[in-house]
Structure formats: C-alpha cells, structure tokens
Image: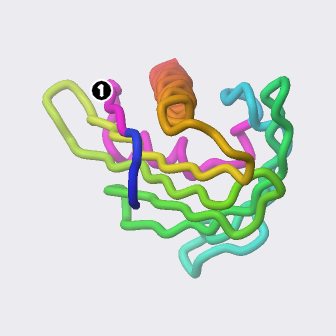
Amino acid sequence: MAEHTRSSITIAATPAEVMAVIADFAAYPAWTGEVKEIEVLKSTEDGRAAEVRLLLDAGAIRDEHVLAYTWDDDREVGWTLVKSQMLRSLDGSYALAPVSGGTEVTYQLAVDVKIPMLGMIKRKAEKVIIDRALAGLKKRVEG
C-alpha cells in the first residue's frame, strides 16, 4: 500500500473468533452501518470469500464495489479493489495478533477516489472509516 491510514484496537477474543466475524460477510449489514447488500462472488478452496460485491450507502456516498480478498489463516486478511464507480483504488487489511486479554486488530486502509480530493481530507475520511469499522467489529465480537 502506498499512503495509508492505520489504527488498532484490542478485542477480548481469540484471533480465530475475531477472524470468524470478519469472514462472515453475510452478517455485515447487521453490524456495519454502510454495507446494505453483500454477495460473495467467488470463494477459496477452504470456503472463505475470494471476491465480494458490496453495496455501500453512506448518505451522500452510494457505490457498489467488488473487492478481491486474500487470507493468511487467522492472522491477516487483505483486500484490493476490482471494480467501483467512485473509487480508483482501495487497498486494506486487518492484521490480528494475540495479546494479553485478547487480540490486537490493526486495520490499514488506502483509498483513491476518482474525484479530486485533498490528501488531508482523504486521510480524515479513511480514519473515520477505520475507527467506525473497528468499533463495530469489537461490538460484534464481544457482544
């Protein structure tokens, strides 16, 4: 990833428990505010999603993305943009590491939109996306 934004949170669960929630795409509309529809288009041999279509609705921004996923067991999942109307690129990952009291989850994200946007505004938007996703993930796993 080129210029990216990153943040971490500790979740009171094992890496396997956290990754199980991350890998359960069908449940995303229930715990992520922006994902309204999701469809797994391709799966890996072990049954995890390899390509996913997401319909996002964040008020003023509504877009459909197709993302390609790569998995490293319960340690990391990364994704890259295959197709979008509003984005030029989107690269992200969740890295999971066991720590005392649970799992440290680090979310890294780099987004390039097709419309001109100041770098400072883009990084602030990435930070909001990351913080909301980590809070939602923590609530879903621990709840």
Q: Quadrant of the N terminus?
A: bottom left
- Whether residue 126 appears in this view of the structure is yes
**Magenta stretch: residue 9 in it?**
yes
The image position of residue 13, as x and y in percent, is: 34, 31
- Magenta residues (range): 6-28
The image position of residue 69, as x and y in percent, is: 56, 66
**What residue lies at 69% left-to-right and 69% top-to-bottom?**
82
Color theme of the render: rainbow
Vertical position of residue 60 compared to residue 4: above or below: above
Which of the 4 quarters of the picture holds residue 12?
top left
Q: Is residue 54 left or right of residue 92?
A: right
Q: Is residue 34 left or right of residue 74?
A: right
Nearer the observer, 39 or 133: 133
Residue at disc 1, secondary structure = strand
Which of the 4 quarters of the picture holds residue 5?
top left
Nearer the observer, 17 or 114: 114
Residue located beneath label 1 in the image: 10
Vertical position of residue 5 compared to residue 111: above or below: above
- Whether residue 137 appears in this view of the structure is no
Q: Residue furthest left?
A: 100
**What residue lies at 63% left-to-right and 39% top-to-bottom?**
117
The image position of residue 78, as x and y in percent, is: 47, 60
Q: Residue furthest bottom?
A: 45
The amino acid marked with disc number 1 is Thr
Vertical position of residue 18 compared to residue 75: above or below: above
Q: Is residue 11 left or right of residue 140?
A: left
The image position of residue 39, as x and y in percent, is: 81, 57
**What residue lies at 84% left-to-right and 24% top-to-bottom?**
59
